[in-house]
Amino acid sequence: MPSSLSWILKDNWPSRVALQQLAARHDVGVVFTDFADLARCLRDRSRLAELTANMRAARDAFAFETHMEDLVTFFRSIIARHEHTPGGAAPITVTRRRTL
C-alpha cells in the first residue's frame, strides 16, 4: 500500500518542474523557498493534515500497482517489435493512457 506522506519540494519557480506541477494538481506538496520557509510549513499542523488527506485520496494514482498492467503491456510491445524487426528495434511510439 502506498504511503500517505506529502512531498517536500524546493520551489523551482519560474522553471516548470513536472513533479512540482503534479504536487500542485493534487495538492500534496510542501513547497518551500528556503529552510526557514520549510520550517514554517512543517509547523503548520492543520496544513500538513490537509496534505496528508489529499495524498491518501490520490495515492492510487501514484502506486506502482496502478500502472503495472500498462507498463507490462508497453514493455511486451517493445520486446515484440524488437524481435520482429530485422536489424534492431523500430522507432518507439508512446501513447499516453492515463493522466495523474
Image (cartoon, helix red, strand yellow):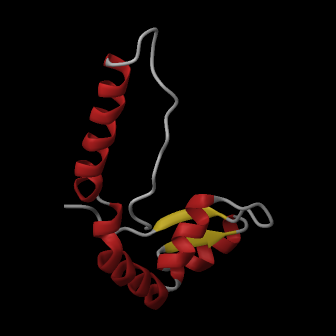
Q: Residue at x 34, y 67 (%)?
A: 61
Q: Which of the 4 image quadrants contains residue 51?
A: bottom left
The image quadrant that residue 10 belongs to is bottom right
* Residue 34: quarter of image: bottom right
* x then y, percent, for residue 40: 61, 79
Percent coordinates x, y for residue 30 in the rendering: 55, 72
Q: Position of residue 76 (x, y in %)?
A: 27, 33
Return the residue nearer the eye: 8 or 90. Answer: 90
The C terminus - image quarter: bottom left
Residue closest to the far bottom: 46
Picture layout, residue 88 above or below residue 34:
above
21 vs 11, left or right, is left
Q: Quadrant of the N terminus?
A: bottom left
Give how far across and how far down residue 65 sits, in percent: 22, 54
The one of 5 and 77 positioned closer to us in this rendering? 77
User: In this rendering, is residue 84 above or below 58?
Assistant: above
